[in-house]
Image (cartoon, rainbow, N blue to C red):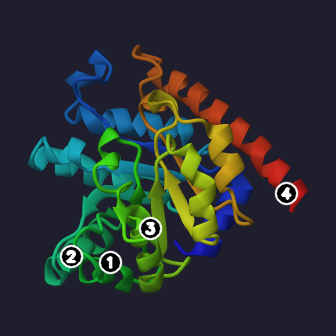
């Protein structure tokens, strides 16, 4: 999916909601456990209930890899079931020497046909460039994350800049707003406006709303740009909104609340531009 298609999708759905399919077999409703593939059965129901409200689904591969081959099969079924025209994210946080990164990129872009993959930049330029070579595919680089450990490296002084600032500025020389996004944690609201100034045209993937306490209003106020420029992810707050046989209805209701709030901010931004 190219940038204009993504922008059009956001405008059409009045949404920049990304739903995280971080599906834990220990947390899904018990009645699904009789299915041959309970994880896919759960994901299918969530997708059916929410596909008109979101513009992206993010699959955290750790939840699937931990189940071995059955998990990878569930992942593949899930990606194939997501309707065409909805942006797909492999939240894999890969990054290694160049030839290894090339294989990771092929895995998620060619074999599983995701639109994007999250990448850890610690090893530098040659570990990131292979992901950027695929037309109409996106590299989503870890910029500033929400976890407590972000203090250990990302927020440390590196010369005249903080390390995360140095990473973002360097990466902007490797990719473009058409193939490079940044992960910016929702709970880093104090930095959101600053990062938007640094990267005015790039899309941000913003995890951390809902269960992690990030504010959708703050994100939208401080980080929206002329194309929206945001994919705001909610996982547990939506997919585990209910745990009964009508769990998908509860998930839809939770997603609808996000979508309606997002529509308000999009309309406000359109008026102010």
The image quadrant that residue 243 belongs to is: top left
The residue carrying mark 2 is 101
Q: Nearer the viewer, mark 3 or mark 1?
A: 3
Whole-angstrom CA distance, mark 1 to mark 2, is 7 Å
Tag shown at residue 154? none
> Mark 2, residues whose alpha carbon is within 10 Å: few (<14), some, or many (≥20)?
many
Q: Earlier in the sequence, mark 1 or mark 2?
A: 2
> Mark 4, residues whose alpha carbon is within 10 Å: few (<14), some, or many (≥20)?
few
Give SS at disc 2.
helix
Residue placed farthest to the left in the image? 68
Whole-angstrom CA distance, mark 4 to mark 2, is 39 Å
Residue placed farthest to the front in the image? 160
The residue carrying mark 1 is 131
Question: Circles 4 and 2: CB distance less than 8 Å?
Answer: no
> Mark 1, residues whose alpha carbon is within 10 Å: few (<14), some, or many (≥20)?
many
Give SS at disc 3.
strand
Q: Is residue 101 visible?
A: yes
Q: Is residue 199 visible?
A: no
Q: Earlier in the sequence, mark 3 or mark 4?
A: 3
Percent x, y of residue 247: 45, 21
Tag shown at residue 161? 3
Front-lying residue, 39 or 184: 184
- For image coordinates 27% across by 35% down, the residue present is 39
The residue carrying mark 4 is 270
- For image coordinates 73% across by 58% down, the residue present is 11
Q: Nearer the viewer, mark 3 or mark 4?
A: 3
Question: Circles 1 and 2: CB distance less than 8 Å?
Answer: yes
- For image coordinates 30% across by 39% down, the residue present is 40
Whole-angstrom CA distance, mark 1 to mark 4, is 33 Å
- For image coordinates 60% across by 35% down, the residue present is 215
């Amino acid at each position: 999916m190219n940038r204009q298609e993504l922008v059009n999708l956001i405008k059409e759905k009045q949404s920049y909601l990304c739903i995280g399919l971080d599906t834990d077999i220990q947390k899904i409703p018990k009645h699904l456990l009789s299915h041959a593939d309970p994880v896919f059965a759960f994901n299918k129901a969530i997708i059916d209930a929410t596909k008109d409200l979101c513009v992206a689904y993010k699959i955290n591969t750790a939840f699937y890899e931990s189940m071995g081959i059955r998990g990878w099969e569930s992942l593949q079924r899930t990606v194939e079931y997501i309707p065409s025209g909805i942006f797909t994210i492999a939240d894999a946080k890969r990054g290694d020497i160049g030839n290894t990164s090339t294989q990771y990129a092929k895995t998620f872009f060619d074999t599983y046909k995701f639109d994007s993959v999250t990448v850890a930049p610690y090893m530098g330029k040659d570990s990131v460039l292979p992901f950027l070579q695929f037309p109409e595919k996106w590299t989503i680089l870890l910029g500033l994350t929400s976890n407590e450990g972000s203090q250990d490296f990302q927020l440390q002084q590196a010369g005249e800049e903080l390390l995360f600032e140095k990473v973002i500025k360097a990466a902007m020389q490797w990719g473009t707003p058409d193939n490079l996004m940044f992960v910016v944690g929702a709970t880093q609201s104090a930095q959101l406006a600053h990062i938007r100034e640094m990267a005015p045209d790039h899309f941000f993937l913003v995890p951390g709303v809902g269960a992690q306490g990030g504010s959708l209003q703050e994100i939208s106020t401080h980080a929206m740009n002329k194309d929206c420029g945001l994919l705001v992810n909610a996982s547990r707050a939506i997919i585990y909104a209910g745990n009964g046989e009508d769990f998908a209805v509860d998930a839809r209701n939770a997603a609808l609340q996000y979508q309606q709030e997002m529509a308000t901010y999009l309309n406000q931004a359109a008026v102010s531009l």
